[in-house]
Image (tube, grey):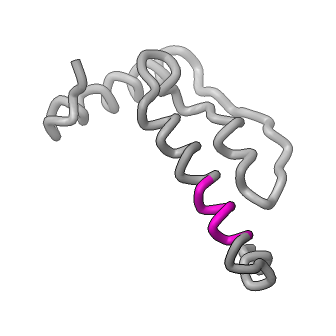
Amino acid sequence: MDEDLATMSKEQLIEELIKLRMAIREHRDSTGHDLCWHHPKLWSLLPEKTDLKISVPEWPEFMRRCIRYRKSLDDSNLHIK
């Protein structure tokens, strides 16, 4: 899946690494609803392209998972105020 890395020059690898780090920082530093799980901009940085047919659970299940995720932040002291 990552065979393209073997053919890149050192400069190309550094450029790719900088691009990926910038995207990770952008996501890390986002707040509110920008932290939701749907990140096509971040996913587009991968070399393989996929058809983004997103499957979203029905509201009750979706909300249970959101609450569980939010609680896990509190439990791990990662809650950002």
As drawn, the residue found furthest toward the bottom would be: 6
Q: Give the overall secondary structure of the magenta segment.
A: helix
Left or right of 29, for residue 81 = left
Give the image location of residue 74, x and y in percent. Answer: 17, 29
The answer to which of 9 and 50 lies nearer the viewer is 9
The answer to which of 77 and 29 lies nearer the viewer is 29
Residue at left 58%, top 43%? 23
Q: In which quarter of the image is residue 81?
A: top left
Q: For the N terminus, which image quadrant?
A: bottom right
> Residue 16: within the magenta?
yes
Q: In this view, does 1 lie above or below 71?
A: below
The answer to which of 18 and 57 lies nearer the viewer is 18
Point out the stretch of residues depicted in magenta. Answer: 12-18
As drawn, the residue found furthest toward the front would be: 11
Residue at left 60%, top 62%? 17
Residue at left 67%, top 61%? 16
Residue at left 83%, top 53%? 49
Left or right of 19, for residue 32 = left
> Residue 37: within the magenta?
no
Q: In which quarter of the image is residue 37?
A: top right
Left or right of 57, for residue 5 = right
Q: In which quarter of the image is residue 9?
A: bottom right
Give the image location of residue 58, x and y in percent. Answer: 58, 20
Give the image location of residue 64, x and y in percent. Answer: 39, 23
